[in-house]
Image: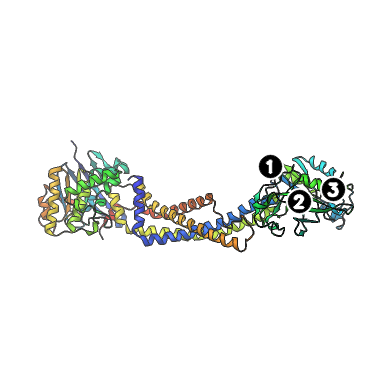
Amino acid sequence: MKYFDIVRTANSNLRKSKVRTFLTVTAVVIGAFTLTMTNGLGDGIKSYVNTQLGNVGAKDSLFVTARSQDKATKEANNGLTEYNPERKKVTVQVNGPPGSLYMTNKDVVKIAAIPGVKEVIKTYTILPDYMTTGYKKFQTTVSQYTDGFNIDLEAGRLVNNNSAEEITLPQTYLKPLGLGENAQAVLGKTITFAFTNATGQQFTKTATIVGVQRSTLVGSAGINASSTWVKEVYDLQTGILTANDPQYVYLIARFDINSTKAQQDALKKNFNNAGYEALTIQDQIGVVNKILNAVTVALNIFGGIALLAASFGIINTLFMSVQERTREIGLMKALGMGRGKIFLLFSLEAIFIGFWGSLLGIGFANIAGRVLNKIAANTFLKGFEGFKLVAFPWQSMLLVIGIIVVISFLAGSLPARRASRKDPIEALRYE
Amino acid sequence: MSALIQAQNIRKTYGNGEAAFTALRGVDLTIEQGEVVAVIGKSGSGKSTLMHLLALLDSPSEGSILVNGTDASTLSRKQVDKHRNQDYGFVFQQFFLNGDETVLSNVILPLKIAGVGARERKKRGLEVLKSVELEDKANNKAADLSGGQKQRVCIARALINNPKLIFADEPTGNLDTATGKKIENLLFFLNKTKKITLIFVTHDEDLAKRCQRQVYIKDGLIVPRARNVAK
C-alpha cells in the first residue's frame, strides 16, 4: 500500500466512528490546552522579565558598591566596624544619601586593575529639588544612563550619553507633568530641573525628552539622563567641594559579555577580595527567574497529567478499533498487506488523534490567552504596557505538538502491534 | 513445466503436548494451471486447514508446499504477501466486504494494497465490475447489496489482480439455490475464458460434481471417493 493511501485510509477510519474519535480528541485537546496555557504563562512572564532586564542594567555590567568590612572581621569585633580612612560615609548631602559609603577616583583605578574588568564607568549622583514643565513642581530622582541599559520604551529612543541634555522618563509621569497621555507627542519637549549647590543657592537646568519608558514590574522606572548632562549638574551642584575628587555611591564595571558563568563568578570573587560588592544583572533578577521556572514546571505537571489520561483514552479507542476491525485486518493481511503497513495504519490513527487534538488545544489556548491578556491588561496589569500575561512563541507550540504526537504514537503502538500480529485465519473465522 | 501448487506430505498440528490436535496427517496434492478442483469434507475434516496452507495463509508443521516449483518456506514474508496479492484471489462464504464503503472501493482493495495509483485503480475496478455486471452499483454502499450481488463483488475483488488461481471457500453457502447456481456459473465461466484455476472448498456434492477433480478429505487425510462422505 502506498504511504499516501495509508494516510488516507487512517483518516477515513477515524471518521467512521465519529463520536468515539471526537471524545478521544477532546481528551487530547484538554491536555494540549492545559500544557499550552501553562507554558504560555511561563513564557509570557519570562519574556516580559527579559525585555524589562534593561531597566535593571546592562548584561555586561557589574553594579559595584563599596563594602565596609568582611563578615569575619566584623564578627571578631563583636559587630563593630573598624575605622578605615579609605571607606568614609557620604557627608556632603549633595553627594548621595547620607550614610552610604562612597568611592573615589582611587577606587576607580583599583577596580580598573581587577583582572576581567574592561572598563569602569563613573556614575555621579545628583539630587534634584524638583522638576517642572511650568505647571506643577514635583520631587524626583535622576539616574545617570549607562550605555547598554536596554530600557523598555513606549516611544522615542534611549539617550545619547555624548549629548548635553537628553533624558527618558516614565510614561506615568506624563499626566502629572501636564504633558498629556500621548507618549509620541511629548518627544522633544523640555523639562526643567532645580538643584541646590553646596553653598545653598538654587539653580535650574533643562533637559529634552527623547524617550518614554513603559511601566515595569522588574527593576525600577525613573528618569535617566545622559552622562554628560549628569556630570555637568554634578559639578555645578558640588562645586568646589568635591569637583576634583568626586564621591561615587556606586560604579559600573564592564566585563566581557561572552564570559562564562564560572568566569563571572571568579570576577565577582576578585571584587569581594578587593573590598567591593559586585552584582550582575542576573544576580539582581535571578531569583525572579528561578521562581518563574519552578512555577512553570509545577503547572506543566498538571498538563502532563491531563495528557497521561488522554493517552489512556487513545489506547482504549484504538484497542476498540482493532477489535471491531478484526475481520478487516484479517482480510487485508490475506490479500497481501504486510505487518509493517498494518502497524503504520493504526499508529497513524493514533498520531492523527494526537495531531488534531494538539492543534485544536493550541488553537483554543490561543483564543483563551488573548481573552485573558485583554482582561489582565484592563485590570491587574493596567499600566504595564507590553506585559502579555500569556505568550505563545511558535517554538513552544511546535514543541507541544511534537510532544503530543510522540505520546500518541507511543499510546497507539500497543494496539497497532496487536493489529499487525493478528492471524488472518483467526481473524477471518466466522463466529 | 512445474505444477501451480504442489503439497508434499504436509502435516499440520495445532497446539502441543496433551492438547495437540493434528488437522492434516500427510497430504499430497498437485494442482495444475487451469484445473477446477473441489476439496470436499465435513467440518473438522481438515479441508479448511488444507486451503489455508495452499493459500500460504499458514505454514505446514511438516512437509512442504511448492509454488511454481519453489518451496514456500524459503520465501520471505514479503514475498509470500506479494504472491498472495498478485497471484491469488479469495472468495469467502461470508463475503468480508466493508459495508460502509462503496462497491468500487471494496473491489479495488487488493490494488490499493499492491500500491497501484488511484486513477488506474478506478479504471480497473470499473472494468472488473463490468465483467460481473455490477458497474451500475459501483458507487453504492456494499451493505445495500443483495447476497448474490455481494458475492459478485467478492468475485470482482478476487479478479482484479488477474490472479492465476481463485480460492472459493463455500462461495454459495450463504446464497439461495438459484443465486448460488449463478455464482457457480460465473466462476466456471472465468475458468473457461481466462484459464483461472479454481479451488472450491465445499461440502456441497452438487457443486463438487461439476468440478474436473474431487479431493475428499476425512480426518486429515485424502480418501478415495466414498459415498456419503460429505453428508
Which residue is at 72% across, 54% downward? A222
Number of residues whose C-alpha sits closer than 10 Å to that of mark 2, classed few (under 14), some (14–19) or many (20 or more): some
Q: CA distance from mark 2 to mark 3?
A: 16 Å
Q: Kindly tell me whether residue A131 is visible in this rendering.
A: yes
Task: Specify the subunit that label 1 lies on.
Answer: A
Amino acid under disc 3: Leu
Residue A257, numbered label: 1
**Secondary structure found at label 1:** loop
- Residue A219's x, y, as percent? 70, 54
Task: Specify the subunit that label 3 lies on.
Answer: A
- Residue A42's x, y, as percent? 59, 56
Marks counted in the figure total 3
The first of marks 3 and 1 along the sequence is 3
**Secondary structure found at label 2:** strand
Residue A143, numbered label: 2
Which residue is at 82% across, 41% downward? A109
Q: Kindly tell me whether residue B20 is visible in this rendering.
A: no
Number of residues whose C-alpha sits closer than 10 Å to that of mark 3, classed few (under 14), some (14–19) or many (20 or more): some
- Residue B179's x, y, as percent? 13, 57
Which quarter of the figure is the N terminus of chain B placed in?
A: top left
Residue A236, numbered label: 3
A375 lies above or below B10: below
Residue A283, numbered label: none
